[in-house]
Structures are given as C-alpha cells and as structure tokens.
Amino acid sequence: MWEGFRHFADTYLMWNEGPLIWMSDVLILLTSIGIVAVLTYFKKWKWLWDEWLTTVDHKKIGIMYLICALLMFFRGGVDALLMRTQLALPNNHFLDAEHYDQIFTTHGTIMILFMAMPFIFALFNIAVPLQIGARDVAFPYLNAISFWLFFFGALLFNISFVFGGSPDAGWTSYPPLSELAFDKGPGENFYLLGLQISGIGSIATGINFMATILKMRAPGMTLMRMPLFTWSVLAACVVIIFAFPALTVALALLLLDRIVGTHFFTILHGGNPMMFINLFWIWGHPEVYIVILPAFGVFSEVVATFARKRIFGYGSMVVALMAISVISFFVWVHHFFTMGAGADVNTFFAVATMAVGIPTGVKVFNWLFTMYRGRIRMSLPMLWTVAFVPCFAIGGATGVMLAVAPADYQYHNSYFLIAHFHQVLIGGTVFGMLAGMYYWWPKMFGFLLDERLGRWAFWFFNIGFYVCFMPQYALGFMGMQRRMYTYPADLGWGTLNFISTIGAYLMGIGFLFMVAQIIYSIRYGQRDLTGDPWDGRTLEWSLPSPVPHYNFAVIPTVEDRDYWWVLKQQGRTQELRPRPEEIQPIHMPKNSGRPFLMGVAFFVAGIGFVFNWYVLAVLGLLGVVACMVARAFEYDDEYHIPVEEVQHTEAALGRL
Amino acid sequence: MANASGQHTAFGPGPGAHGEEEHKHGAGLYIAGYILSLVLTAISFWLALTRAMPLGPLMLVLIILAGLQIVVQLFFFMHVTEGDGPPWHSMALLLGLIFTFAIALMSMWIMSFHYQVQ
C-alpha cells in the first residue's frame, strides 16, 4: 500500500524531485481550497455557473479570457524570472539542466499560446461587436466553446508541472528531440494535446469573428467606415484561419509518431524531421502576426483618441493590415535559413521578410503623423503606445538584420535573436495588449484603473525591459546561445547576464504594480459614469459602462467613420439614445452549460492520450460527441427580451 | 420582429436561419455527401494500404481524391453556390486556394534540398 503510493507519487507527482514541486503542490492546494471556501462561504456557486461558466455573452467571455491571460502572464513571468536567476551568475546551480529545459519550454509556450492568444481574444470579444454595432458575435455558442477549449487546453498544459512532468523540448518542439526515442516522459504529450485542444478553439474564434465582421455590421457601417481595431481583427482572423491548420497537422502527426509508432518525423522508414520544422513555421510565423496585428489595431484607436485627431492615412492603414496578413504566409523559412535549403530558397524568403517592413513602416509613420499637431493626453493607454513606437522600431530593425540570410548564420539561435523577438513581442504585442486593456477597462468594468500606480508599473516595466534585453543583443554577438542553462566564468558573459537579470526583476516589479493597481482601483478607481471616459470616437463609447447584456437597445445607423466623434462634434449625440417607441423585443441566445462540459470532455480525452490510458481517452471523446449530438437536437436555444425589460434597464441607466 | 432584416439579430447566421436551411435542402443532400466522402476516403485508404500502384501514380491519384473530397465538402455540406449578400465565400476560397498552393509548392521547393551534395 505504502509502496504503491510512493510509486504513484514519484511517477506522477514527481515528489522525488525536491522542494520546488512540494511548494507548488502546497500553493496549488491552498489556492484551490481558498477558492472553494470563498465560493461556498458567500454561496456563489450558482452565481458562478449561471453568470460565467454557462455564459454566451461576448463581453463576459472577453473578461474570462482577460483573467486567464493575466494569470498566464504571471506564470510565464515567473518562469522567466527563474531562468534569469539561473543565468545571473556563471556556473550557477540554482536550477539543473533538466529543470531549465522544462522552464524555457513552458515559458515560451505559455507566453505565445496561453498569454498572447487569450489576450488578443479578450480584446476581440470585448471590443469588436460593440465597435460594429452588433448585439453579439455571429455564433455566440461557438464563442463559448472556443473559450472553454482554450481554458482546458491551457489547464492540460499547465497541470503537467505537478502531474506527470513538464514538456522539455522547447516551445518549438523539434523532432527528433521531441520523438519518443529521446523524450520518453508524458511532458511532450501534454504539450501536443494542450496546444491541439486550444488550437481548435482558436480556429473557431477566427471563423467566428470573420463572420461577425463581414455579416453583422450595423446598417451604414460599410467596410471603409469600420474602426481600425475591427479591421486589424479581420486581418488577424484571415491569418488564423489559414495558418492554424498547419499547426494542427504538425502536432497531430507528431502525436501519431509518439503514441502509435508512425514515422512522419523520424529518419527511420522514410520520415523527415525537417518537415515538422517546415510545418511548424508555416503556422509559427503567421502566428506572430496574429498576435501583433490586433496590437496595431489598438494603437490606431488609442492614437486617434488621445491625439484627438482622425487617424492619418486610414486607407493606407487598411491596405497595410491586409498586406501584412498576406505577406505573412511567404516568410516562414527565415526561422530556419541555417537548414540549408539552398541559396535561391533563402534569397526568396529573405526578400519577402524584408518586404514586411514596408507596410509596417507605413503604419508607424501614420501613427506619428496622427500625433503630429494633435492635442495629446498622456493617459495610460497613450503612454504604452508612445513607448511602443521606439521599442518596435528597434525590434523591427534588428529583425531586418536577422532577415539577411547570410548574416543569420551568425545570429541564428543566439541571444541576439532572443533579444529581437522579445523586443517585438513585448514592445509590440504586450505593450499593445496593455494599452488595449487600460483603454477598454472602463468599458468592461465601469471604472478606470488608477493612473498613479499605472505610471509606476509603466516605468518599472519599460526601464526593466531595456535593462533586460539590450545586454542580450551584445551577449548574442559574444556567442551566447539560447537555451543554455549555464556558462563558464571565463567567457566574460557574467556582467551582462547579471544586468539582464536585474532588468527582468524590474519588469516583475512592474507587473506587481499592475496587480496592485487593479486591486486598488476595484475599490478606489474613478467610476465611469458617462460611458465615454476618454472622449472616444467609435460606437462602443456611445454605450454606458459596463454595457447592458444586449449591447444596443436600438441598433444605430452609421453615417460616417468615427461616427460617435462626428455626432459629438455636431451636437447630435441624442440620436444614439434609444427612443421608447423604437425599442422592440431583443432576440438573444440562451446560456448553455454544454460548452463548459465539452471542454471538460476534451480535457479528459487529453489526459487519456497523454498517459496512453485509452479507456479514458475514449470516454472523453464520447463526451465530446454526446455534447455535439445534444446540440444538434436543441431547438429552444434563443429567447426575446421583452420591451418592458429593455425600457426598464435603459431608464435605470438614465438613457430614456 | 427585431430580426426583420437579418443583420439586426443578435446572431445572424445562427439558429434563426436554421429552420429555413432545412426546408431548402432536406436530409438527402447531406446523406449523399456523407456517403460520397466515405467512399472517397475508403478508396484512398485502400489504395495506400494495398500499394495497388507504383508510388508516383499513387501519389497523383491520392491528390486527385483529396481534391474531390474538398469539392464534396464544399458543395454538399457548405453549399458554396448559395448565399445572399456579397460573395465573401468566393473571395475566401480564392485566397485559401492561393495560400494552399503557395504553401504546398514552396514546401516542396524548400524540402527538396536541391543545392545539397547528395
């Protein structure tokens, strides 16, 4: 009995690995007990189920995405700090090689797939239907499924840390290292299944928002009157729909290699590991554009709002977004120039890569020209936007350096590359998402985030960023390679690494200030009573904050770009207030618990495949099928909000 | 009703339109499509497993079968020839075809390693 327990604990709970795991177990246990206790004490279980777990409301789904993104930002950030602590000194043994491998793998995977992706989806959900004058997304039920697949995919990936062991073949998971012969543990299976499950959700979100933007716009909202954030979401959706299937295929084939013994990516029996790398980056490069395009959209909204000017070069902005989304499919080889596909191949992809700089440059100049002679207010969203411009410009310039194929043979997989992509992903995506979070926070929650604490967070994070990553460019030139867990003292890398670690901790402090800011503002933040705290330009600011669940009591008819701003200028804002005689019963989708249950079923199936427990896998998949069949026979999934209720709500908000 | 013009409803192409769809097609079209796709899949598996022909022609036949599979999906399940409003789906299909061919052909170009000494 005791022996059996010890065997289980050592195999699955990894209790033989030492205090880091024990501490995590205790923390996870205490947090879970805390959550359960609070929910029980305040009798909130029903509220949790009715209001959140079963919701199909895009605004609530957006908030849940945001919470997940921030939590994953925390975990990815802790991973980063552990790595920087290990690298601070030469010959350090804070972590051993195996743990270091696991930590850089989870850091990369979490930051891209479980932080950046839910963060952009949070903003998609929160802003897009409001900006185009819609009552929800095109497929609200599918939207809930997308979220829960993401959630349980992320949970599956994260649980590997304390149950079975983390993946350790890098976030790119190249074979042959990630094949069964070299990577026995279940960690790699966790990676493959976690990504696969959340990837299904991502594709569905791409389809959902493309349909929403193309089919659900309010009357008069022509494509060329759409806000630029909505345009950027459309561009990102094009990339999601066409890029994610490549990842699905790559992961599925690698999983087949690992669990049923096929040979797609082994040298044996005619397989080719390079094909995985090719497939991975067919998705992987477009993926970075997926996460940067919505950030560009946020900057376009923020710049116009806080410079109090119409965006400069709207048409060229749209063309640039679309051009980037198409070119993004013709650059992927620059991730493996050193594979040696040939001079002609490398030349083509090098030139295509540099070409991306052109539309991006157009956008940067358009933002600068929008600011030029504007009456700029340096509120938090604008602060992050202004910080983005130089950061992204440097990151873009080093990107063009990396695009020079012959030179890339020197930079490849060095800390120069690490510094480059952190600069564009943090300076671009993270700054953009934070700007978007600050910008739409009052719309989500009805109060503003505290400026003073936000500025502390901003300066710590920004200064920390440069202190952390500028030395890494130099370290790259000095020959330091990525993913090495320690280095000898006589190479002279010690000082720069130590400085870099200080920067990482400064960024960590910046994050803590953000947490403090949110907690402080829940209680003391300035309440948004007007619904338009930033003097905004687009339709979402014509609604009260937080927005009633049906969004628009009466769907507006749009006559111009930046319509809300135009109406304010002409003193016609009253036109967007509902008139009692115009209000009609509002057709809405019903909540459903099935998306959540489907996520659970996928999770069970995932665990089954990870450990090759096929009974569990089959049970999970049967659960998925049962959910789909139940949906197919569901006829009563919509209702109408009666006129009196809408009138009552609008009157309570002082809008009637 | 609020959904008089289709665009105004909370969920345009969702269940609201569902009832009409079923009237238009009935189950026959779906069953025919389902059987066709099963047959196409069975043929390709049978060809691959029995190695019924040499590798070169086999690959060509499999690619053609895969192409037919796409056509079946598009016509029987997704009804590409129907729809109102601007022809977004044609544009999306065209873009998808461009990306598919570009990615497939370029992958073949990349993975041939034709500059390397064999």
Image (cartoon, grey):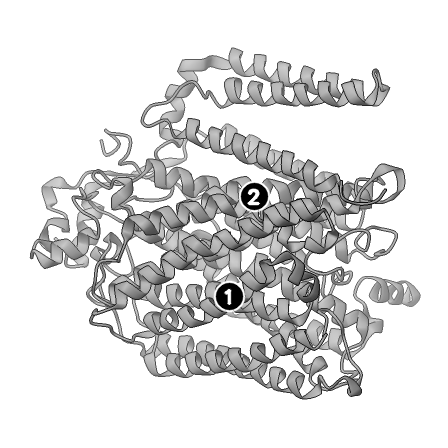
In the picture shown, does residue A152 fall above or below B48? below
Question: Helix, strand or loop at disc 2?
Answer: helix
Q: Position of residue A380 (x, y in %)?
A: 34, 74
Residue A445 visible (yes or no): no
- Identify the disc placed on residue A87: none
Dot 2 crowding, Cα within 10 Å, few <14, some 14–19, many 20+:
many
Report whether B13 appears left or right of B44.
left
Q: Which residue is mark 2?
A: A243
- A448 in relation to B81, above or below: below
| Image location of residue A35, percent across then percent down | 55, 68
Q: Chain of mark 2?
A: A
Residue A566 spot, x, y in % from top left? 14, 54
Direction from residue A134 to residue A578 in the image, left or right: left
User: Looking at the picture, how far across and down is residue A641, in whole percent?
Assistant: 27, 42
* Quarter of the rendering containing residue A6: bottom right
The answer to the question of whether label 1 and label 2 lie on touching residues, with beta carbons closer than 8 A, is no
Q: Can you tell which quarter of the image residue A406 is in?
A: bottom right
A47 or A318: nearer the eye? A318
Amino acid type, mark 2: Ala
Alpha carbon of mark 1 to alpha carbon of mark 2: how far? 25 Å
Write down the chain letter for disc 1. A
The answer to whether any part of residue A329 appears in the image is: yes
Residue drawn at 68 percent across, 63 percent down: A412
* Quarter of the figure that contains the N terminus of chain A: bottom right
Quarter of the image holding residue A59?
Answer: bottom left
Which label was assigned to residue A397? 1
Q: Amino acid at mark 1?
A: Ala
Q: Residue at x 48, y 43 (%)?
A: A326
Single out the mark in the foreground, 1 or 2: 1
Q: Is residue A4 left or right of residue A139?
A: right
